[in-house]
Image (cartoon, rainbow, N blue to C red):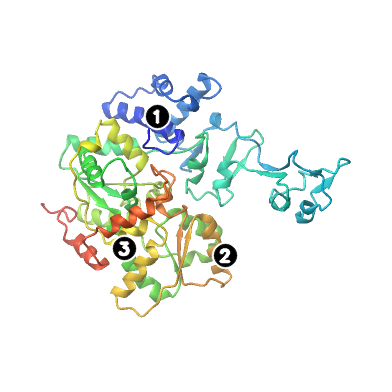
Amino acid sequence: MDKRFDTYVQHLKYRVLLEVATDYWEGTLDQKKRKIPKIISPGPKSTMRCCIYKEREIVRERIELALGGDPENPNLLEVIEPACDSCPFSGVEVTDLCRGCIAHRCEQACHRNAISFGPDLHARIDKNLCVNCGLCAAACPFGAIANRRRPCEVSCKVNAIHAREDGISEIDEEKCTRCGQCSYACPFGAIMDKSFITRCIDFLKEKEADPSRNVYLVAAPSISSQFDFAKLGQVITGCKKLGFTHVVEAAVGADLVAMNEAKELSSKGFLTSSCCPAFVRYVKISYPTLKDKISSNYSPMAAIGRYIKSTDPNAKVVFVGPCIAKKMEAMEKEVAPYIDCVITFEELMVLFDAKKIDLTTLEESPLDNASYFGRIFARSGGVSEAVAQALKEQGSTFEVKPVKAAGLDQCKMALNQARSNRLQGNFIEGMACPGGCIGGPAALTHATRDAAEVDMYAKSSKEKTLQSAVDYLMADPSIAGKEE
């Protein structure tokens, strides 16, 4: 397997995207004769299903998603049904490890009276009464009760995924936050996000035909923990070789957001962050009484996109990061004027390989000067530190008392406490992904060292304050529409 990825599933998705991107860039993409056999044949044996015919059908659906997916489906995540038939039905089951003990702790733990005992003294579960809470499984001293849940269901902290009667997983559109954790968790690659990689290629091809067209790549701060086989400066050079006019740090947008968020927090007294679109959607769906507490500030992506468009209205702005929910955010009417396309780190890797760019052979190019505080937005706790720094720089006496929630399960706990006025804090930093953005589902790697690498990169910043980074942004000729 390609060592640049964590799993074979990521590798298979990459291979499909690579074929589509290469053909699309060369203008040879044939809707009727797609290279399905070529995509399948070189793969490791572990990516194959029961037969090649089924694998071809799955690859066909992957290609459809690589080309934008079903326009009638508003969700960015789609279940590839032929790939989703090997997981067992979820539920609590008594295994043959049951010893028929007399303590009956499983029965005492069940609040639904769903457990009874047969002549053999073994526990039995009435599925008509069981709600799969798992309390009996936790109570059994022998571990004889298994709480079997599909990986996608386990990863979804808002219970937006369930199995249909035919066994295929289904996403509840009303509950889904688009965090995308299910897509990374599924061991069969049966859930995939829609790709807009061809739209990005269109922008680059237009610039190639007309060099006066500027295409900006806004890079999420978590880029510092990705592409670990090359130096960050080489990645920036590679982006410019793809045709991007400028590569701009979204972390500069984070500097702007932190300054504004600090002012709003000190004015209102209580706030939740707004930089994670999956968290924002979760609050609006599940905690509508708290939606007026969401920061009114744009996310760093939208903030820097708005600034770029203000200086270069005809430019195209492409965001790259580890986040699927950012694709949703870019479609919202408040953000759409500033962000033209969102791609993931997985898709950026595809673009490099489609153009046969070997990052390891390139010289390094610098990235602009976001502050330390803007760059640490990539990991949990970063937003809180940045807001505290902004209050300090603004001479405010307001004390931020942050509650850092990384992962929607932690967000749920914090929001429940806020709703019942029990929260020990005045600022909820909500991140849908474990560890923050570095745990995004479309990251190339999900290593535990990523947070340390983000901090190391942040410490290399030349700008030691948020204000100096903002001042640098305003004076940067490459972004201000001036000649360099």
State whether residue 57 is above or below residue 330. above
| Element carrying mark 2 | helix
Residue at 79% x, 49% y: name it: 114
| Mark positioned earlier in the residue sequence (1 or 2) | 1
Pointer 1: residues within 10 angstroms few (<14), some, or many (20+)?
A: many
Q: Earlier in the sequence, mark 3 or mark 1?
A: 1
Q: Which residue is mark 1?
A: 16
Residue drawn at (19%, 35%), measured in percent from left and top?
208
Query: For mark 2, does the 10 Å Cα neighbourhood hold few (<14), some (14 to 19), or many (20 or more) residues?
Result: some
Of residues 15 and 266, the one drawn nearer to the viewer in this rendering: 15
Between disc 3 and disc 1, the foreground one is: 3
Picture quadrant of residue 356: top left
- Residue at 53% over, 71% down: 423
Residue identified by numbered label 2: 416
Query: Circle 3 sits on which residue?
Result: 373
Q: Earlier in the sequence, mark 3 or mark 2?
A: 3
Q: Which quarter shows the N terminus? A: top left
